[in-house]
Amino acid sequence: MAYALPGLPKAELHLHLEGAIRPLTVLDLAREHGVDLPFRDLEEIERALDFKTFLQFLAAFQQVNRCLTRPADFERIARELVEDLVAQDVCYAEIRYAPMHPMRRGMTFDDVTAAVIAGLLQGQREHPNIALALICGLTRQWDCTAAAGSAMGWAGRGLDAIDIGGDEAGFPAEQFAGLYRDALAAGLQVTAHAGEAAGPESVWAAIRLLGVKRIGHGVRSVEDPKLLTVLRAEDVTLEVCPTSNVRTGVVASYEEHPLRRLWDAGVRVTISSDDPAMFRTSISQEYEVARQAFGFDEAELLHATRNAIEAGFCSEETKRALLHDLALPARGGRVMLGREAAP
Ligand code: ADE
Ligand code: ZN
């Protein structure tokens, strides 16, 4: 498959493992395990992805998750995802997985996490020119206590950070303040979905009550000039996912999307694909959207890549190596230094 902008180094901070499963793998896993999904072929998947609202999208995300019935499935999709990223010249990616879905189907946090890490490492062994970090995505509408407690035990062992996703409007950040404090104390870094399905007040809560320096989406910050000033002053990074926001109805169209306004306001903006398989996009396509719909030139696209690396949850050593490579005029054929052994 040909991707847009070949050769341009890309980095994405906001990528859901379960939202990136190849459609053929979803069908393959469901068939293999006898899972009765509401779609049985590629055409039916296409139809199931025709959600009109954010909550309908979350329901579809839950359906797709049902094809994952064993830890080995997570290993497979993690490995395949690394392969897909490398094919698009992604030099750095942060992948978030949602362990609370399989936990509700009887799998353990530790088994799923170990499988995801094994898959990422295998992908990285096969394609050493990519650096990775791993984020545990907690589902805000469910009781996160057990998953968060387990996540803390993986700090420094392949897990870098936590996130809260899911129903932002129904389950505000306030409820997670203690959990975020504990996670930070345990050595995990933090990000949070905010300003996607709720307004700027949700972003205020995330930065003030959860202590995050990164926001998943955050696009509705544009409604509050004072918030923009704070995001700029405190160097908060937005993980912006343009096509996701159009597909889930957060904004009506690319024309109305605030990517360019946030960028021009001096906020640290990065570009991501969120759930590429579910939104019929890819990180290359999102960079291409930034170019075509928002007028980003090559220097600005590279700046977005640099923003993502600088705001990444990887080690300072990895950042230095990635930024060094980014500054080189040509890519390919070189051994890239500084890749971590574990994601
Ligand atoms: N889970 C997967 N994708 C998500 C998104 N964009 N927002 C909230 N939760 C999600
Ligand atoms: Zn997301």
Image (cartoon, grey):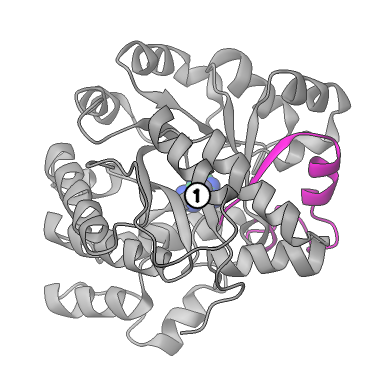
Where is 216 relative to 257, above or below?
Answer: above
Residue 315 on image: x %, y %: 38, 30
Q: Disc 1 residue type? A: Asp
Highlighted magenta segment, given as a residue range:
245-272
Residue 162 on image: x %, y %: 39, 31
Where is 289 relative to 221, above or below?
Answer: below
Q: Is residue 167 visible?
A: no
In this rendering, would 265 be left or right of 135? right
Q: Is residue 270 visible?
A: yes
Quarter of the rendering containing residue 6:
bottom right
Question: Could you tell me which secondary element the residue under label 1 belongs to?
Answer: helix
In this rendering, would 9 be left or right of 116? right
Instruction: Using the image as rendered, state which of residue 329 and residue 11 is in the foreground.
Output: 329
Residue at x 22% of width, y 42% of height: 341
Instruction: Using the image as rendered, state which of residue 17 and residue 314 is in the foreground.
Output: 314
Residue at x 63% of width, y 59% of height: 248
Residue at x 48% of width, y 69% of height: 88
Quarter of the rendering containing residue 169:
top right
Quarter the C terminus occupies: top left
Say if the magenta span includes residue 26.
Answer: no
Residue 67 on image: x %, y %: 25, 66
Residue at x 70% of width, y 61% of height: 246
Quarter of the rendering containing residue 20:
bottom left
In this rendering, would 220 be left or right of 21? right
Say if the magenta span includes residue 268.
Answer: yes
Which residue is the site of mark 1? 325
Density class for disc 1 (Cα within 10 Å; few <14, some 14-19, many ≥20) is some
Instruction: Using the image as rendered, state which of residue 110 and residue 338 is in the foreground.
Output: 338
Where is 281 relative to 219, above or below?
Answer: below
Residue 308 on image: x %, y %: 57, 42
